[in-house]
């Protein structure tokens, strides 16, 4: 049995993960409209991942006799000034998610809720990986710079990053 306070906090996390999924889906649409195939694929995969993060929380609430709430999600931003601006937003959102997970863990600890504390550890590792991934992409974009064909090379790099992520997912399944 989960406390009402924890149930509410986990539902807020569901909303945050669902929002991330929709933000990344809207980013995929923008990348597609810009002809950025690698970035489109990357954002679609990220969006699916975030939906899975949301569903994991849904299932957990059901297991511990809580009630999961399907979030109302605002229309995400539809266009970006640049790929760099877009990835900066992704990185900022991931940092927000990490901070939120840390708060949930603090609450679980305060309540002596070992089950939720234990469940949330998966998200700690996931957030470390996500933040690291976004930082490395921003570093690559910076290294490529703003030359005449930079967008082409950035997109190629992101395509390669996406392929590596897919391969890693395959290994872990
Ligand atoms: Fe599930 Fe990337 O936050």
Image (cartoon, helix red, strand yellow):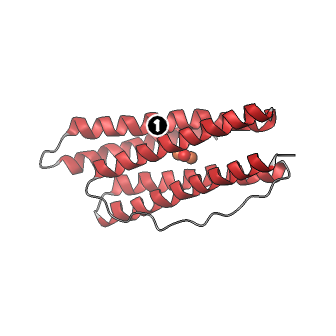
Asked if residue 137 is positioned above or below residue 89 in the image, the reply reads above
Q: Is residue 151 left or right of residue 158?
A: left
Q: Position of residue 39 (x, y in %)?
A: 36, 53
Q: Quadrant of residue 91?
A: top left
Q: In what element is the residue under mark 1?
A: helix
Q: Which residue is mark 1?
A: 131
Q: Tell me the residue at 21%/39% (across/down).
A: 144
Q: Nearer the viewer, residue 172 or 122?
A: 122
Indicate the quadrant where residue 14 lies: bottom right
The residue positioned 86% from the left and 52% from the top of the image is 65
Mark 1 burial class by Cα count in 10 Å: few <14, some 14-19, many 20+: some
Residue that appears at 41% across and 60% down: 28
- 79 with respect to 143 (left or right): right
Q: Position of residue 126 (x, y in %)?
A: 57, 37
What residue do we see at 35% from left, 52% from top? 38
Residue 88 position in % (x across, y down): 35, 45
């Amino acid at each position: 049995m989960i406390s009402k306070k924890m149930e509410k906090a986990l539902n807020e996390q569901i909303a945050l993960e669902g929002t991330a999924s929709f933000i990344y889906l809207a980013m995929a649409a923008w990348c597609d409209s810009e002809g950025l195939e690698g970035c489109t694929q990357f954002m679609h995969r990220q969006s699916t991942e975030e939906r899975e993060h949301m569903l994991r929380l849904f299932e957990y609430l059901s297991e511990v006799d809580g009630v999961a709430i399907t979030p109302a999600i605002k229309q995400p931003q539809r266009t970006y000034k640049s790929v760099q601006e877009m990835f900066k937003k992704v990185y900022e959102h991931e940092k927000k998610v990490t901070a939120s997970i840390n708060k949930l863990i603090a609450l679980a600890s305060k309540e002596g809720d070992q089950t939720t504390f234990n469940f949330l550890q998966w998200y700690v590792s996931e957030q470390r990986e996500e933040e690291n991934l976004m930082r490395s992409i921003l570093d690559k974009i910076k290294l490529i710079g703003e030359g005449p064909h930079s967008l082409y090379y950035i997109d190629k790099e992101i395509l390669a990053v996406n392929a590596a992520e897919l391969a890693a997912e395959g290994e872990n399944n």
